[in-house]
Image: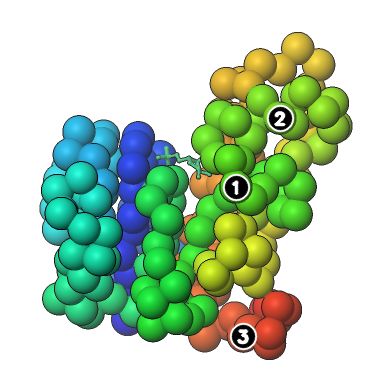
Amino acid sequence: MLKIAVCVSGGGTNLQAIIDGIKYEMITNTEISVVISNHLDAYALVRADDNKIPAVCISPDDYETREAFHEAFLEALDFYGVDLVVLAGFLVVLPPQIISKYKNRIINIHPSLIPSFCGKGYYGIKVHEAVLERGVKITGATVHFVDEGTDTGPIILQQAVKVEQGDTPERLQRRVMEEAEWKILPKAIHLIANGRVAVFDKTVMIEE
Ligand code: GRF
């Protein structure tokens, strides 16, 4: 059984997709051991509570130093025996020490087709604003392993989504979630939990 920590900062619709994926067996061999939020008022914590999943709030604001926050974060992962860390809209940057300790055991969902519209400054609604501003016709989402860079780790799954005329950033964000994020994040977890994902440097091989 793969024990996962789902890290969130906001609404937690991706967390909900994972909860539902486990419930309806699209994700097998997986248990959410803990939900970690950096905001006490994140709606994701209500979703965890509703589903009787342990949840903790660990925020950099509550620690005197960034190091103390990192230590608390690592302690929580240890305490809950986490095998895989899932960043599902988690707006806190993890330091190289955590990333190297959990090498190829941290995944992230990004709301664009990497390497487009990613990297520093591209998060949340900003991604969709930039997509519309540039006028691209296809966008999407990417699940990738997290390495020391920003959105630079090995790509696991991608799903394309059409940009439609008249899209607003909010409308596009919602469609990217519905058509891409909520599908590929649960799928990536399922594949990892069933030993079907192997990483060779920057390349991910998936056993179909
Ligand atoms: C998603 O768009 C995700 O790709 C981005 O943050 C958003 C999180 O949404 N990194 P939610 O909290 O899962 O609803």
Drawn side of residue 183 relative to residue 8, left or right: right
Discs 1/3, front? 1
Residue located at (78% from left, 33% from top): 162
The three-letter code of the residue at mark 1 reads Lys
Q: Quadrant of the C terminus?
A: bottom right
Q: Is the CB atom of the residue marked by disc 1 within 8 angstroms of ligand 1's nearest atom? A: no
Residue beneath disc 1: 120
Mark 2–mark 3 CB contact (< 8 Å)? no
Where disc 2 sits, the SS reads helix
Drawn side of residue 28 relative to residue 200, left or right: left
The three-letter code of the residue at mark 3 reads Ala
Residue beneath disc 2: 130
Q: Is residue 77 visible?
A: no
Discs 2/1, front? 1
Q: Is the CB atom of the residue marked by disc 2 within 8 angstroms of ligand 1's nearest atom? A: no
Residue beneath disc 3: 198
Above or below, comparing residue 194 to residue 108 in the picture: below
Where disc 1 sits, the SS reads loop
Q: Position of residue 3 (x, y in %)?
A: 30, 75
Q: Position of residue 7 (x, y in %)?
A: 33, 55
For the residues labelled 2 and 3, the Cα–Cα distance comes to 32 Å
